[in-house]
Image (spheres, rainbow, N blue to C red):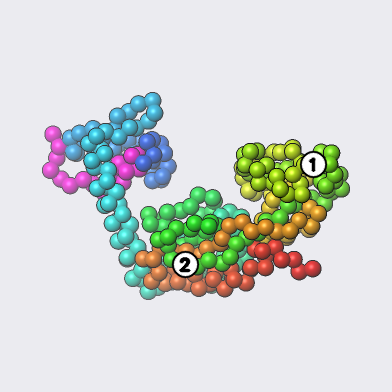
Amino acid sequence: MPTSSSPDWENLRVFLAVAKTGSARQAASTLNLHYTSVIRRLEAFEKQIGTQLFHKSAKGFEISEVGKTILKRAENMEDEAYAIERLLAGTKDEIAGVLKVTMATTIASYLLIEEITQFQENYPNINLQLHAGHKFANLSRNEADVAIRVSDAPGDTLKGRRFGKYYEAVYAHKDYIKKYFPLTKNTQCRWLGWQTPEEFFAEVKESEFSHIQSYTQIDNEILLFEAVKSKMGIAYLPCFYADNVSDLVRVNKSQPIPRLDIWLLAHPEMSNSKKVQAFMAFFSPILRAKQHKLQGLLSN
């Protein structure tokens, strides 16, 4: 028999996470809970409402018809809970507490790490949570308060500004060029890149290096950078970090080409947050001042 008490919000959060991922283990990882806690809460929720929400199969947790009817309303409740969190955060006057910031690993590591350090020193009462990686954090679900995003489609619902594009050129270790002579027709030079071979060679077919057909796929930008530094091959790399390595050179003085836009963004409902305002005010002039690095404009 179902109980008459209202559903526990934490149980609803578990239900939503399992419904979205189709896996109790993935839900546990998303919620930072132990797997057994997810199962226990899910079973408690089903017992409370007196019906089965999922069917277990070889594919994972498949949502039941009853579960589907609950899902949309639970998502609406979740959206409202996130909105309340943002509203409360925006009313606080102090520049203190947790500030969740997300950006690409390379942006954090090679473009802004010194300034991130300075920001933390300037605002010691802010507990910075820096999330780096390729996956876009969902600001509507409060996965981050501020984003420095690399994209030509950063999200129409977010508030912020664009700081131009970053540029890439073809780089190699200077010793690699001396050994393999990339411009010669029968060179044994090798391309390195993160795309599939089909995608990559479609991109470079009009370049001056289209005659190079050997290719190694490396799906991690940091590893790709290290591979070029280790004389594994040539690659398109962002100028803002490849130009900082003295042993790397642009192959045949390769001219930089534009890639994606750089954005500094926040959810509109977080625009009144003093912490968010402090971060955006601090990094806006910094990103403007780094345009020469982003565009690969060499000083000599």
**Amino acid carrying mark 2 in the image:** Gly
- Taking the image as shown, residue 30 lies to the left or right of residue 116, namely left
Q: Position of residue 94 (x, y in %)?
A: 40, 73
**Mark number for residue 160?**
2
CA–CA distance in space, label 1 to label 2: 43 Å
In the picture of the structure, the residue carrying the numbered disc 1 is 189
Foreground of the two, 284 or 161: 161
- Say few, some or many: other residues with alpha carbon within 10 Å of mark 2 (under 14 / 14 to 19 / 20 or more): some
Q: Is residue 25 above or below residue 7?
A: above
**Amino acid carrying mark 1 in the image:** Cys
Question: What residue sits 66% from the left and 64% below the top?
Answer: 295
Task: Single out the residue that lies furthest toward the front.
Answer: 206
- Tell me the SS state at disc 1: loop
Question: What residue sits 50% from the left and 73% below the top?
Answer: 281
- Tell me the SS state at disc 2: strand
- Residue 3 lies in the magenta-colored region: yes
- Taking the image as shown, residue 168 lies to the left or right of residue 97, namely right
* Visible residue check, residue 6: yes
Q: Mark 1 or mark 2, which has the lower sequence index?
A: 2
Tell me where residue 91 sits by quadrant. bottom left
Tell me where residue 157 sits by quadrant. bottom left
Which residues make up the magenta segment?
A: 1-19
The C terminus: image quadrant: bottom right
- Residue 11 lies in the magenta-colored region: yes
Foreground of the two, 273 or 209: 209
Q: Is residue 221 above or below residue 167?
A: above
* Visible residue check, residue 113: no
